Amino acid sequence: QASIFSRFFRMFSFIFPFVNVIKLIIASVTSLVCLAFSCVALGGSAVALIVSTPLFIMFSPILVPATIATTLLASGLMAGTTLGLTGIGLIMGLVRTAGGVSLLQSPLRKIIVNRIKARLGGGGGGSRLARLKKILGLLNKLRGMGAGGAAAPAAEPAPAAEAAPAAEAAPAAAPAAAPAAAP
């Protein structure tokens, strides 16, 4: 029996090439817009920084506005750089997709999936009871650790000869420590 998803994908499989074309158009337009904004932001920030530097030196008593302006210029430079890197990344993704390497076939994806599976302990295999036992074992291991991460020292039993005098002295000291009631 075919699942509902496989029937759906077989029924609408003619749409997938159109979706790829739409993704290509959106990614190319987005990359061009990001690159254009990055050029404007980087150019404007660089010109403003070049113009404002001598003004900051000449009018040094105005430190608060100078700090604000410098912060804005630095954030403009960062925004331009980020937009530029985003645009370049989109273009590289388009080139990779045009070369026939999709994300599903990418060797980088396989590496990432294998790392995730290794960290999760096999990728979800096994029964719930086995996973519960593994978690409880880890908790017991953590509970047995001392403050410095070392195993907790085992408590040594007190010798019977030393424990007997202490047990006899304790009841005699208890009545003497009780406060007397005032009349």
Image (cartoon, rainbow, N blue to C red):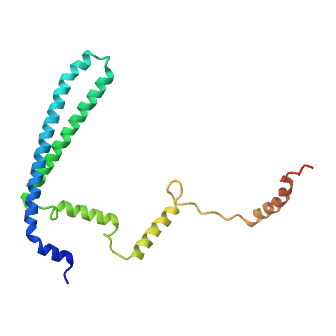
Relative to 105, is 76 above or below?
Answer: above
Residue that extends furthest to the bottom in the rendered view of this protein: 1
- State the residue in front, 142 or 126: 126
- State the residue in front, 160 or 22: 22
Name the residue located 15 percent from the left edge and 73 percent from the top edge.
Answer: 9
Find residue 17 and report its horizontal and vertical position in percent.
Answer: 7, 65
* Image quadrant where residue 65 sits: top left
Q: Is residue 24 left or right of residue 147?
A: left
Q: Is residue 125 left or right of residue 166?
A: left
- State the residue in front, 103 or 138: 103
Relative to 112, is 64 above or below?
Answer: above
Find residue 153 and report its horizontal and vertical position in percent.
Answer: 58, 60
Q: Is residue 67 left or right of residue 94?
A: right
Find residue 175 and report its horizontal and vertical position in percent.
Answer: 86, 57
In the picture, which quadrant includes the N terminus? bottom left
Name the residue located 29 percent from the left edge and 17 percent from the top edge.
Answer: 60
Name the residue located 21 percent from the left edge and 35 percent from the top edge.
Answer: 77
Find residue 99 and report its horizontal and vertical position in percent.
Answer: 6, 59
Name the residue located 22 percent from the left edge and 35 percent from the top edge.
Answer: 76
Residue that extends furthest to the right in the rendered view of this protein: 183
* Image quadrant where residue 111 sits: bottom left
Numbered marks: total: 0
